[in-house]
Amino acid sequence: MNKSKTLAVQMRGITKHFPGILANDNIDLDVYSHEILALLGENGAGKTTLMNILAGLYKPDAGQIFLKGQEVEFHSPKDAITHGIGMVHQHFMLVESLSVTDNIILSLQSSGLNMHTSQVKKRIQELSKQYHLLVDPDAAIWQLSVGEQQRVEIMRLLYRGADILILDEPTAVLTPDEATDLSKILRKMTEEGKAVILITHKLNEVTAFSDRVTVLRAGHVVSNVLTKETTKKELARLMVGRDILFRLEKKKCKAGKAILEVEHIHAINDKGLPALVDVSLQICAGEILGVAGVAGNGQRELAEVITGLRSLTKGKVLVNGQNITNSTPFKVINAGISHVPGDRIGVGLASNLTVSDNLVMKAYRKPPIVQGQLIKKRSILQFVDNLIKVFQIKTPSSETPTRLLSGGNQQRLILAREITASQGMLIAVYPSRGLDVGATESVRSILLEQREHGAAILLISEDLEEITQLSDRIIVMYEGKIMGIVDPDTTNLETISLMMAGQALSTIEKHGEEKTIA
């Protein structure tokens, strides 16, 4: 097989405006076959907009696209896929109640709708074997893990003959093992001559997956380098225009009185199965308690039980000595608990409302926003403008729809609202998920700052680096149970990983002692 690179796509002078925003400013981009190109940049740098143009979702205000030297113009994603270009979006576009095969059939052009189901299944199995996708044609989408659903999205593009595949933040919702599997799948594709573009802000992903990196900042290309000839530190500097602190300074914990007490709680998940089994924990003022574990082991349900979004079947929850077991979210808020949810779009924000509306959502019932029965518009403007300034939320105006902000600025908005509303207790679930290195540094700094001010913080994250850097103590969960509580300063990652895999801390310590004695 000839594995020499050939120029597959040229984008020249691409410019795209949105109201109040210049997303892409005269961008040139080259994409080669047999290569994985990482399109790297901060949230809001213009990466997804540029790829939405290549995938036919947006039409550029200016610029040209060439495929194998021939100029093309796309009016829809159908035009792009006809030319062999397909995109797997960050939020999958699958019908959950239908099978894998039915979803593939739905994605086919009209000429493919007359194909027999058996033919489609056979082709799915062939592609699955060819690219190691391991997709069951008969499985319903809702039965699949997030990683498996992503493979179905890739399968849809391969079935339709895509030679240029664009993946938007592909590992944002994957476990480490699923991310490794994805890397192997993408490498197999490039070996067969396909071109792959990864939209990402994860430096580990860039160095592990890609052959070449194009860095965007504020709608401009600032660098185009071979991955093997650069470093994560240099890429981070190119992304944000300054040096990034990969490890934040954390002062010694000065824990105060107990703020949150969770005593022997039990709860079930959405499928009616046990999600929490006899979970107990305590968090003190001025302390960050981290919760580590592979996704789906009860972390989400723990946050929901504490914040009133899910009922527990046994046990109790106390805040400052007040029993809030199975209270409504409104009562939980009034008790002083704030919540940064893992799903910022679906739960954390009303995306179609303005930045102002979202910021004032928990403050409009109290002075100075309200006096008697009257809501004071001037007080709202002062309140909102102050939060935008203090938390450095980049927005064209306070009246901009929240959905138009970058992920990092949406997260800053949620933190601004929740920290302001908090009365000493903050539940933060995956606070830096989907954020670039600059935004991640900012969010983590904010959490440490709140800890210094005496807040009690429950930090739930799948990012072990985040958990170990920020937490004063870490509990590890497996199948709804606590495997143990460890000190991140004296516990190695291997021990935490073993606990995440289901080994109790007591068992690990016992085996360790036996090994030492032997």
Image (spheres, rainbow, N blue to C red):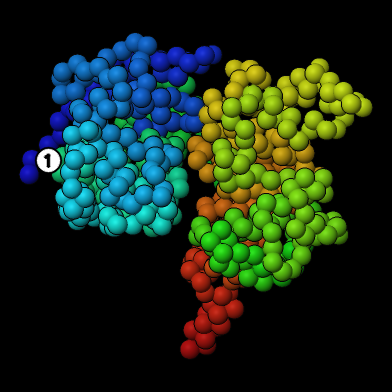
- Does residue 382 lie above or below 149 as drawn? above
Q: Residue at x 51, y 63 (%)?
A: 493
- Does residue 372 lie above or below 297 as drawn? above
* Quarter of the image where one finds residue 59: top left
* Quarter of the image where one finds residue 358: top right
Which of 158/115 is in front? Answer: 115
Residue 73 visible to the viewer: yes
Q: Position of residue 267 (x, y in %)?
A: 64, 65
Q: Residue furthest left?
A: 1
Q: Residue furthest top?
A: 62
Q: Position of residue 325 (x, y in %)?
A: 77, 60
What is the tally of numbered marks visible in this picture?
Answer: 1
Which of 478/95 is in front? Answer: 95
- Does residue 164 lie above or below 96 as drawn? above
Which of 94/399 is in front? Answer: 94
Q: Position of residue 484 (x, y in %)?
A: 62, 70
State the SS at label 1.
Answer: loop
Which residue is tagged 1?
Answer: 3
